[in-house]
Image (tube, rainbow, N blue to C red):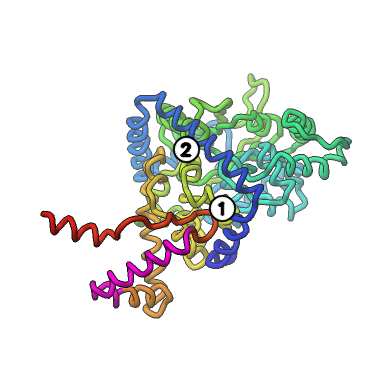
Amino acid sequence: MKSTAHIFKYKTKIALKNVNLQNALARSKSHFIDKRRAAVNALPEFNRLRQRACEIKEHTLAHLDFYLEYFETQVHNSGGYVHWADTPQAACEQIVSICQATKAQRVTKGKSMISEEIALNTALELNGIEVTETDLGEYIIQLAKEPPSHIIAPAVHKTREEIANLFYEHHQKYGFTKRLSQIPELVSEARKVLRKKFISADVGITGANFLIAETGSAVIVTNEGNGDLTNTLPRVHIVVASIEKVLPSLEDVATFLRLLARSATGQELTSYTSFSTGPRRPEDLDGPEEFHVVLVDNGRSEMLGNEFHEMLRCIRCGACLNHCPIYSAVGGHAYGWVYPGPMGSVLTPLMLGLDKASSLPHASTLCGRCEEVCPMQIPLPKLLRQLRVKHYQSQGKASFVGLGLKFWAVFAKRPRIYHFMTAIIIRLFARLGNLGIGRNLPRPQGETFMAAWKKRQAKS
């Protein structure tokens, strides 16, 4: 990834002028927000569940080494294997090695943000392995050769017409030569194409919403059932997950499940909640012959020991994205990497380096809506401010921001000049009206704050 210092600014300008994107974002915004509000209002104990989930997560993070080793032991006891990977490269090499050892030619994948993080598809394809995303949204963006725009709705930026064109272009080789226009027709055609992929796959790869130390299980939540077909039909099932996904017990997972769907899609529960524990047993009717779990660190151990450890509570629900005015204006691709929105503006600098993502901590109004709706009560505005401080400190005294603050300080230390200049600027904005695109400033009305304050002081 190149520095987002110029990527973010460049892509936001394009996004704000993209009519299709703006229409798609407007539709999804109201959909996600309204459904979440209704689901939360219908659960009086929602805030108590949030507090309980935070306590569970903080306890687990404080004893993460213990629970990861416990998880590994339980996976081994169930007949599976656990592999540890410090870096994305190590994770990809391990997964490719498993595929090659089983002579796999075709892989199906469930939706997984960690696989996007480590660029797994690219690694598999470079080694001659055919990869098919099976989540409908992920499948659409795979055809478009694009990254996800949203962590729970990867193709939210695509219109129906754009999807129809993709299917018409890519499905003709499967014998589908009709250009479709209706959503049920598009879904049906995708199902027919993917069904053959499920049946012929040698390896199935899924992520994990949660890992359970008590049982050595991996949990995925989906609304399409593709996850179940991915982890039961192929001979080998590989789970790839980051280390902070582990929770102590089944009872703990139940708490998180009550929060996740409500925060993400406004559902009480998703259509499918699947628990995978080891390979197929003799009495099982289906399931893989081999079960592997690849645990990825990629900077999380470092986060665990610094001031950003609260970010490790994130359960990837996407609520912060849905309520963020910046994300709602520009979409996910403007952020330049896997994780968009407020959570991405914290994670990306921590994982890739602040020098490569210096614009992202500033891509926020700090309005606080992200923290308000976060089921894990992550103080995202605070973390963004901490990253801004680090960025400022790394720039040195001669930075553009530093010079700007010094220039501002000249006026701020001289109240009469400051008030005079403020009045001029406000009148200028009043004459110019709305400025920019995407987010317009309201016309200033009435007197300035200082003028109103002086009147109030005089009356008292």
Disc 1, SS: helix
> Along the line of sight, which residue is nearer the eye, 248 or 171?
171
Q: Secondary structure at mark 2?
A: helix
Q: Earlier in the sequence, mark 2 or mark 1?
A: 2
Question: Which amino acid is tagged 1?
Answer: Val
Residue occupied by mark 2:
71
Name the residue beneath numbered marker 1: 330
Comparing 424 with 354, the one in front is: 424
Q: Position of residue 239 (x, y in %)?
A: 59, 40
Q: Position of residue 417 (x, y in %)?
A: 27, 75
Q: Nearer the viewer, mark 2 or mark 1?
A: 1
Outermost residue, left side: 460
Residue 369 pos. (x, y %) = 40, 45
Q: Residue at x 74, y 46 (%)?
A: 143
Label ID, residue 92: none
Let me know if residue 432 is in the magenta part.
yes
Can I make out residue 293 in this image? Answer: no
The residue located at (37%, 71%) in the rendering is 393
Q: Is residue 301 above or below residue 52?
A: below
Quadrant containing the N terminus in the rendered view = bottom right
The outermost residue toward the bottom is 398
Q: Which residues are magenta?
A: 409-433
- Label 1 crowd bin: few (<14), some (14–19), many (20+), radius 10 Å: many
Alpha-carbon span between mark 2 and mark 1: 40 Å
Q: Pick the residue in front: 322 or 394.
A: 322
Indicate left or right for 174 with 344 as reference: right
Q: Is residue 453 covered in magenta?
A: no
Residue type beneath disc 2: Phe
